[in-house]
Amino acid sequence: MKKSILAGILAFTLLLSLAACSGSNSNSGSGSGEAKASGSGLVQILLKNAGIEIGEGDDKVNIVYFDSQKDAYAALQNDTIDAASVYSPYASLAEGQGYKIVYRCSEEEALKNQPCCRQVASTKALEASPAAYNAFERALIKAYKFTQENEDGTIADVKKYIDIDEGYIKTEVYGGYGSSVPDPDKKSTVALKDTIVDLGYTDDYDIEKLYNTEIYANALDSILSENPDDSVYKELKDHFDQYE
């Protein structure tokens, strides 16, 4: 089934932290635990830039993949794992339990504006029901505006689905470590795809034909026509024009 990328969820500076256990007893190199996802590629970018080899041995980092972020986080309790690559909300939970945050993507120049989750739909469905997807995009854009203007309401909404301390939620959502933005971020996604190919995750492919930014652009333009002076929507427009 042919699919198209039409929007984003996480963008700008994806929260991806490395929580290291200072009491590790590992004696055979460094072990890093993580879930198999785009985040694992980001870890490899930093290791490559630092000249650190991935593999087994005292002078290498051995990356161990888990089925989920939950499993990777839990692996910190294993003495053979020195660090775990995690995202929200595990970074805050780890810090609250005494683990050290080694880095965050937002603090690494090589990882600035890295995209994460993309909204994908079948190309056939997009072509058959453009109005429905336009309405969906309008809803995402308006939800983003809500997060920018109603911090307490946003935290309360998140807590309905992720029942952790509100202080952790505030850090994850408003701490400056990541952003949940509906923009497709095409330029950044293409750059990340090229990096993933370079790291050997997959063979090269043409991502251009898989992108449909028209639906998001039309949805944003329609909202701007209704709210021409709204600063949040204008900022989204500026970002889209820069990264489309």
Image: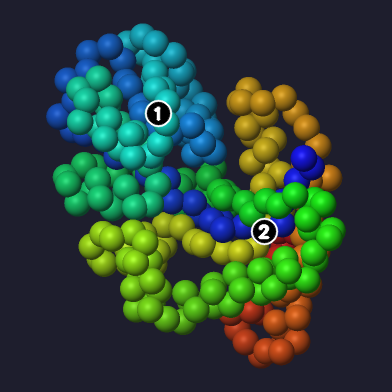
Q: Is residue 1 left or right of residue 24?
A: right
Q: Is residue 154 above or below residue 168?
A: below
User: Which residue was labeled with disc 1?
Assistant: 66
The label on residue 186 is none
Q: Are marks 2 and 1 in contact (CB under 8 Å)?
A: no
Circle 2 residues within 10 Å: few <14, some 14–19, many ≥20 = many
Foreground residue among 223 and 108: 223
| Residue at (35% x, 27% y) in the render | 32
Instruction: Please identify the quadrant where the N terminus is shown.
Output: top right
Count the labels in the image: 2
| Residue at (33% x, 34% y) in the render | 71
- Residue 235 seen in render: no
Badge 1 amino acid: Phe
The coloring applied to the image is rainbow
Instruction: Please identify the quadrant where the C terminus is shown.
Output: bottom right
Q: CA distance from mark 2 to mark 1?
A: 27 Å
